[in-house]
Image (spheres, rainbow, N blue to C red):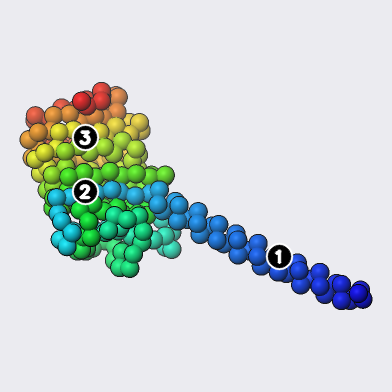
Amino acid sequence: MKLKSKIKLITILLVAQGLLFSACTKEDAAEATVNILLNSKIIISTDKTPGDMIKLTIKKSYDAKETDEVWVDLNYNAKKDAGETVITFGKPIDYKLGASSIMIYGYVGYLDCSGNEIKTLEPEYDKHHLETLICSNNKIESIDVHKDYKLRTLQCDNNPKLTKINVANEHNNSSVFVFSAKNCPKLTCIQIDKGFTPGSKWVKDKTANWSEKACN
């Protein structure tokens, strides 16, 4: 084989190898992004049934990129189906339930899920994003946001079945500016960080107590 032909062949092989590596890298990056999103979710269970509507107001976290998606798994199947991607942020949107439980995936910084007959609400993250959680007028029995150290606002008023809240985030609760748990007659224990004294914007019923120990 002539020298020029050999050089041409080598060049073609190198270019092909480079294109293959680039494609693999992009695929790996895309897969990593999907895994991150799947590990950042809020699980919600309600007394509503499939076919009912659930009203949610969602905003991305301040550190989310414009390209980062948020989607509501209305079928509770851990797959993004048609129509589940959130395209309107900061406004209340009605979503049709495909199951009695849903998962909200992505970098959610603000969630208002009030008035939806919610029984359980569980944030699960690989990173901390939730800054505002408003879950009033529901049927929640317990709230645990101790891992959400970026949390600024927690409003959970009018939850008649609520018995305990864990908001101790090991950051002296200094990040939480607004806390409201009024009209929760069964609420007796609110766990806070050691040494923290709730201020005037931390409000609760008289029957509820601040506790530095874990609530039973």
Residue type of the residue flagged with mark 3: Ile
Calculate the distance from the C-alpha at mark 3 to the C-alpha at mark 1. 56 Å
| Label 2 Cα crowd, 10 Å radius (few <14 / some 14-19 / many 20+) | some
Choose mark 2 or mark 3, whichever is in front: 2
- The residue wearing badge 1 is 17
Q: In the image, what residue occupies the spot 18% across and 33% down? A: 164
Marks 3 & 1, CB-CB < 8 Å contact: no
| Residue in front for this viewpoint, 75 or 111 | 75
Q: Does residue 55 appear in this view? A: no
Residue 92 percent location from the top left of the image: 20, 62
Q: Is residue 75 above or below residue 182?
A: below
- The residue wearing badge 2 is 45
Query: Is tag 3's residue or tag 1's residue first in the polypeptide sequence?
Result: 1
User: Left or right of 29: which side holds 55?
Assistant: left
Residue 154 percent location from the top left of the image: 23, 43
Query: Hey, which quadrant is residue 185 in on the image?
Result: top left
Q: In the image, what residue occupies the spot 10% across and 44% down? A: 158
Q: In the image, what residue occupies the spot 87% across and 76% down? A: 5
